[in-house]
Amino acid sequence: MKPKPRFRELTDEEEERILKAAEEDPDNPPLTDEELARMRPAREVMPPEFFEAIDEMRKTRGRPKVEAPKVAVTLRLDPDVLDRFKASGKDWRSRMAEELRKAAGL
């Protein structure tokens, strides 16, 4: 079964109206054939240091690496147990993990 599209397709009239508005935008005129012909890939015109910096930034994105990462699990709990931990405040998950560590003798 084919997944339902997230957005409906534009009608021809809607698409035409959008294209016309884009072409008439004084702050962003369409590129000319000459401008398109002069375009070059960024790697040809930017210094190598630029791409080295981008590569470095990509390496440091996301959460910092931890020695022992936590594991996501699905666990069914009695509502009263869950309510008690949630009522203890914002860090209820950490407190629950600590109680489980104690119960496991860790």
Image: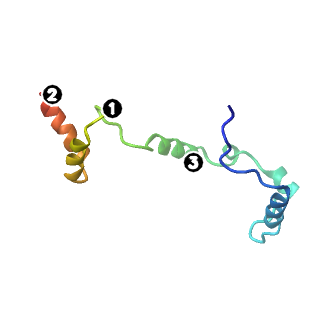
Q: Residues within 10 Å of mark 1 (few under 14, many from 20)?
A: few
Q: Marks 2/1: CA distance?
A: 16 Å
Mark 1 or 3 closer to N-term?
3
* Residue occupied by mark 1: 71
Q: Secondary structure at mark 2?
A: loop
The one of 21 and 96 positioned closer to us in this rendering: 96
* Residue occupied by mark 2: 104
The numbered dot on residue 3 is none
Mark 2 or 3 closer to N-term?
3
Q: Amino acid at mark 2?
A: Ala
Q: Residues within 10 Å of mark 2 (few under 14, many from 20)?
A: few
Q: Secondary structure at mark 1?
A: loop
Query: Which of the two marks, 1 or 3, is nearer to us in this view?
Result: 1
Quadrant of the snapshot with the N terminus: top right
* Residue occupied by mark 3: 50
Tell me which residue sits at (21%, 42%) in the image: 81
Query: Which of the two marks, 2 or 3, is nearer to us in this view?
Result: 2
| Image: 105 above or below 4 | above
Q: Position of residue 54 (x, y in %)?
A: 53, 45
Q: Secondary structure at mark 3?
A: helix
Tell me which residue sits at (85%, 60%) in the image: 13
**In the shown orientation, is residue 14 left or right of residue 79?**
right
The one of 73 and 51 positioned closer to us in this rendering: 73
Query: Which of the two marks, 2 or 1, is nearer to us in this view?
Result: 2
**In the shown orientation, is residue 64 left or right of residue 10?**
left
Q: Residues within 10 Å of mark 3 (few under 14, many from 20)?
A: few
